[in-house]
Amino acid sequence: MRRPLGKWGAMAFSLGLLGFIYSRLDFRSFAERILNADPLWLGIAFLCFGPQIFVTTLRWRVMIQSLAPLDTSRALRMVMAAKALNALVPSKLGEMSKAYFLRKETGAGVRIGFPAVLLEKILDLGGLCFWMLLGIFLAPEIQEPMVIGASIGLGVLAASAASIVLPQLGLGLKEKFRGKMAEVMFGWAELTRSWVERPGRLMTIVSLSVTLWGLHMLQIYLFFPVLRQSMDVSIALAYIPLSLLAGLLPITLAGMGTRDAALILLFSPWADASTMAGVGLLCTMRYWSDTLMGVPFLHNYTAQIGREGEGEKLHDPGSQ
């Protein structure tokens, strides 16, 4: 019962927080912003989904290439099916399903699949923080939230590097862990070793992570011209990632509410609350559009699993 209660609790918190935010808005100004949105810029923004999905799929393939080789079509199925499952759990934990799909597709067990998904999430945070630090560096004036953002960003980048380098040192993992946890730690070391031993592959993975989050930043930045609001690029780069990090807190569904509140507060010197609520709404549309695109792929997987289950029953003499 804990998982369903957690999901419904996150949904209730999101709805409550959004209700509080919208009750404080000038709703007429908010409606005008949405109704007067520029459809051309909106179309350009949503075209970013194509390269985002391509880069995500390519990175997943490169990450596991040595230990669980995949062709592009199977990697794409995994990526998109996991996006659909993100709708059911907070903090994009639906991505963890890729470990299961990887086992179904290649036979790679939890030893490889679980560390691969965790490392992918770490790389995502690193890519996001890279752009945040760049925005802070380019900002015309350093403000207090930027100092907090820089501290978070530098900490995340250091932790990301450590997650790749430290497993190569061993550090007595065999003695410290037992059972499944030991398998995961050894798999983590094995996976990162396959990158470190091929510096070109490691650089490709890091470059793809930075590129992916550059595409995400571009898409969200385009929401400002969609709503006919000018915004300095450095300010957007500094504060959009902070808002997205707030949305990752596992207390809301898909970051709805916490992300919106962060956008309104952080951008208040440059844009009014109605505009930033509109940007938050577009970010939510962006998330759910991404999720809905994954539904056919998830349906394909569930149908395949169902067929395999029926086949196992037919071949099991005890089921007759």
Image (tube, helix red, strand yellow):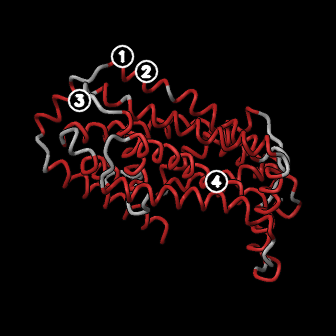
Task: Give the amino acid at mark 4.
Answer: Ser
Q: Nearer the viewer, residue 142 or 119?
A: 142
Asked if the residue under mark 1 is in contact with the one under mark 4, i.e. CB atoms within 8 Å, the reply is no
Task: Give the amino acid at mark 1.
Answer: Leu
- Camera-near label (2 vs 4) is 2
Q: Earlier in the sequence, mark 3 or mark 1?
A: 3
Badge 1 density bin: few <14, some 14–19, many ≥20, Cα 10 Å = few
Q: Is residue 176 left or right of residue 269?
A: right
Query: Image point 50% across, 40% down: which residue?
Result: 291
Return the residue at label 1: 40
Query: Image point 58% across, 28% down: which residue?
Result: 51
Q: Could you tell me how many numbered marks the image carries?
A: 4
Asked if the residue under mark 2 is in contact with the one under mark 1, i.e. CB atoms within 8 Å, the reply is yes
Give the secondary structure at mark 4.
Answer: helix
Residue 165, given in percent of the width and then of the height, sits at 73, 61
Q: Residue furthest top?
A: 40
Return the residue at label 4: 97
Return the residue at label 3: 34
Q: Nearer the viewer, residue 22 or 141?
A: 141
Residue 160 in which image quadrant: bottom right
What distance separates the C-alpha of mark 2 from that of mark 4? Answer: 31 Å
Return the residue at label 2: 44
What distance separates the C-alpha of mark 1 from that of mark 2? Answer: 6 Å
Q: Earlier in the sequence, mark 2 or mark 4?
A: 2
Q: Is residue 18 left or right of residue 184?
A: left
Give the secondary structure at mark 2.
Answer: helix
Residue 120, given in percent of the width and then of the height, sits at 64, 51
What distance separates the C-alpha of mark 4 from that of mark 1? Answer: 35 Å
Task: Give the amino acid at mark 2.
Answer: Ile
Residue 227, given in percent of the width and then of the height, sits at 26, 28
Residue 299 in sight in this render: no
What distance separates the C-alpha of mark 3 from that of mark 4? Answer: 35 Å
